[in-house]
């Protein structure tokens, strides 16, 4: 059986695509080139499904949620706050898995930040 090799891309609708791309670059350091290609570091990727009634994604209208691996969650959250981003007050520790925090991008998409254990 053929299998997928990994995530090949993530595509989002936006009222202002250039501004949203700039926010991801300036606030999260996601340095994609003019074609949207981003060379990420090797690491784990989680593929998980959630109950349709979950509040974990923030708004129930949001059907998917990006999760980015980070090296230092506290530093990333402080950086986002300094840039005026909408950062959730709480972070969560999950033993053996890592630490999690959340930010909402300018288009209202909740993003999870994960510092793996």
Image (spheres, grey):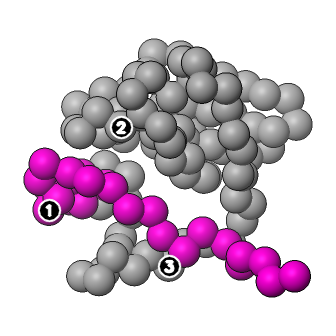
Secondary-structure class at tag 3: loop
**Badge 1 is on which residue?**
18
**Residue 35: x and y, percent?**
29, 83
**Badge 2 is on which residue?**
109
Q: Is residue 11 magenta?
A: yes
Whichever of labels 1 and 3 marks the residue nearer the N terminus, that label is: 1
**Depicted 25 relative to depicted 56: above or below:** below
**Badge 3 is on which residue?**
39
Task: Give the residue drawn at x 66%, y 44%.
Answer: 115
Task: Give the residue drawn at x 74%, y 60%.
Answer: 44
59 sits to left or right of 49:
left
Packing grade of label 1 (10 A; few <14, some 14-19, many >=20) is few
Magenta range is 1-24
Q: Quadrant of the N terminus?
A: bottom right
- The residue nearer to you, when weighing 29 against 103, is 103
C-alpha span from label 3 to label 2: 22 Å
Task: Give the residue drawn at x 33%, y 55%.
Answer: 12
**Residue 33: x and y, percent?**
30, 80
Is mark 1 in CB contact (under 8 Å) with mark 3? no
């Amino acid at each position: 059986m053929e299998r997928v090799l990994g995530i090949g891309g993530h595509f989002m609708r936006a009222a202002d695509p250039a501004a949203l791309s700039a926010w991801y670059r300036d606030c999260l350091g996601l340095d994609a080139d003019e074609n949207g290609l981003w060379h990420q570091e090797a690491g784990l990727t989680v593929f998980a499904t959630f109950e349709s009634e979950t509040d974990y994604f923030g708004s129930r209208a949001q059907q998917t949620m990006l999760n980015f691996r980070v090296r230092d969650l506290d530093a990333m959250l402080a950086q986002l706050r300094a840039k005026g981003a909408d950062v959730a007050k709480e972070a969560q520790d999950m033993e053996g898995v890592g630490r999690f925090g959340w930010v909402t991008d300018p288009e209202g998409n909740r993003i999870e930040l994960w510092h793996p254990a």
